Amino acid sequence: MTSVDIIVQQLINGLSLGSMYALLALGFTLVYGIAELINFAHFNVFMVGSMVGLLTLQAFGLVGQETVLTGLPLVGVLLAGFAMSMGVCGLIGMSIERFLLRPLAAVKGPAAMITTIGVSYVLFNAVLLTLGSDSKNFPNPIPPVSWAIGGAVLRVREVAIWVISLALMGALTYFVSYTKLGRAMRATAQDPDAARMMGVDVDRVIMTAFFVGGALAGACGMIFGLYYNLAKVDIGFGAGLRAFTAAVLGGIGNVPGAMVGGVLIGLIEAFAGQTIGAAWADVVIFSLLVLVLVFQPAGLLGRLAPNKS
Amino acid sequence: MISRRTTIKSLLLSATVIAGAGGFAGKAEAADKVLKVGINLSFTGADAENAARIGNGATLAFDEANAKHEVPGYTFQLVKYDDATPTAGQYDPAQAATNARSMISDRATVAAIGPQMSGAGKAMAPILSQGDLAIITPASTNPDITDPKFAAQYRPAGKAIYFRTVATDAYQGPNMANYMADTLKVKSVYVLDDTGAYGVGLADAFQAQAEKKGVKILGRDKLDPKAVDYSSILTKIKAMNPDAIYYGGVNQAGVKVAKQGYDIMPNVIKAGGDGMQSADLLKGAGFPAVEGWYATVASPHFDEAGDAKAKAFGEAYFKKFNQHPDDYTVTCYTGAEVIIQAVKDLVKAKKPIDRSSMREAIQHVDLKNTLVGPVEFDGNGDLKNKVISVFRITKNDKAPLDDPTAQYKYIGTAPMS
């Protein structure tokens, strides 16, 4: 491998990692934008998503890397996997809002945030007790096709991850920008009281934000499993913390900001591993976060919505 | 309030211990004196399956001894201790320390078996030393625990109490380096570890010997076992075109090294220690990712088709547990044999059987013909006869793909330094 090949390969690695962080960061940013709340349960909603994906694929009889599908069965199985993980995680997100956070709406202070931390633990331990703590071999039915770009290798699963992530981000952008519910969301983000007066069902909008955030976490869990062929009860914290950092880095509450932040952190992680050692990646990422917060407190792209008091 | 809770807790605890013991050992003869032997392994969590296979060795040995009245007047009773906790998801040194204290506080416990993990051993050894309770480990290989350099830390009371029926990583790493250089003709290697006590020690020992053998060390990196993505570090290694990579560590990072290593550089020779010899690796990473990995075990490989004793053991084991024994099942069985022999020696010499006489007797046990060869301990508790076996994962379609006794193919012993 020449140094150009290495750079290309690390770009591929970083972009794959980054697109996962971006999807996960969107969930944080979406909920924060609407409800002004950091949803710490998001970490483990993501983990539950990968477990649901695992169980769904196993229900189709896929075990490990043994079975490879093509054509219609492949698309069908993947669609089912994504539908299940996104659906279940969306419902979990929605239930968190409806049953745990809404009753706390009138309570000032950090009660709501602490509730989400509690939910995170409940999810973690529920999976731990039912599925155990061992590494699970996540099935990957995508054929092991790859292309050589010079000395670098681009695998079909990386392309699949980019395409799926871009599609989901595109769909989200379209939803927020061009649909009626999306417009209601933006209105609620700007000023919930005014939105309510204009006839927006604010409760429904908030619940939608939690559903969409959860569904994105579920999709991300599924993508994570397909990419690493791995599902494990403790994956939520590491990936979730990076994704949260990505959301803050890009400007929390800002949808394009979360995407930029996610991809940026993925690239930093890849190139830090190449140059100064994998153990230093976190040092670089969090130093950058501190610097950005000192000099640009609103994040790289800033908050698009005006601040609420 | 606090005192009541403590009482309830200790009641519950003793109830579990009794329940565990009841399920694990044979019934005592009415007139026999009961000798308790504690067994501490990681019975739950990530290494549970290995723990069960190891523990079965001791169960079989004591059940046989009790059935045959091998030591007239005495019955052995195994008391099970689990050092894994749900929060750790694997062994927890704090739990191991608690277990060591429980063993000490039961006066009827005269010897112990375990632990599986070196990290647990480091936590238990100082406590057992103070209590003068000898423990025989069938699987923990970190050399520090028995190294006289660290005597003040791991045996503060002075005498050796940590005995092994396995060799240590001071041989496991270097011997694999010899095997790589001599047999696999490896010229360059990249070394990885998982930052754990076992992994770092193993990788260091490997690296030092590899250098001595003239193998070029291309680099050394530490992997955070909780991180998920090793692709960037593996890409960096791939670009250096190594003949081989060596990974010192256990499953948690090992599963990911195997998976991503296969994706990124399928044709590079990959090797690890006994941490990479497990059912959990086969389950977590699976074929084709694990195919071709080399792993070592710090004991002679048990051959079921070997001599009469081996055959008898293999048959008895299969009859009782309906599976084939691991090599560390055999070292555990041997550990139990050592304890039984120590009791026999004491009875013969008409000495009382207590912890300190047991420690002394274990120290001087001299078994010529066990399943792992001659068993004698040096003054630190290490096995005198050290053998490192090399295995290679080779897919065997006829057996379950997560059965380590079928999927790890025995290659031979690794050359001594």
Image: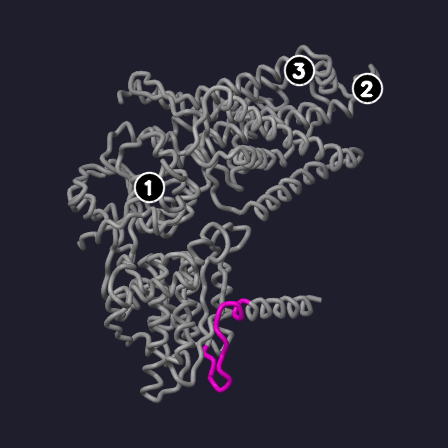
* Vertical comparison of B234 with B41: above or below: above
> What amino acid is labelled 2 in the image?
Arg
Viewer-side label of 1, 2: 1
Q: What residue sits right under mark 3 in the picture? A: A176
> What amino acid is labelled 1 in the image?
Lys
Q: Report the number of discs.
A: 3
Chain label for disc 1: B
Q: Position of residue B24 (x, y in %)?
A: 49, 68
Q: Position of residue A91 (x, y in %)?
A: 68, 31
> What amino acid is labelled 3 in the image?
Val
Chain label for disc 2: A
* Vertical comparison of B92 with A297: above or below: below
Nearest to the observer: residue B111 or residue A300:
B111
Give the SS element for disc 1: loop
Give the SS element for disc 3: helix
The quadrant in which the C terminus of chain B is found is bottom left
Residue A248 visible (yes or no): no
To the question of a shared chain for discs 3 and 1, the answer is no
The residue range painted magenta reads B20-35
* Vertical comparison of A304 with B250: above or below: above
- For the point 42% across and 33% down, the residue is A65
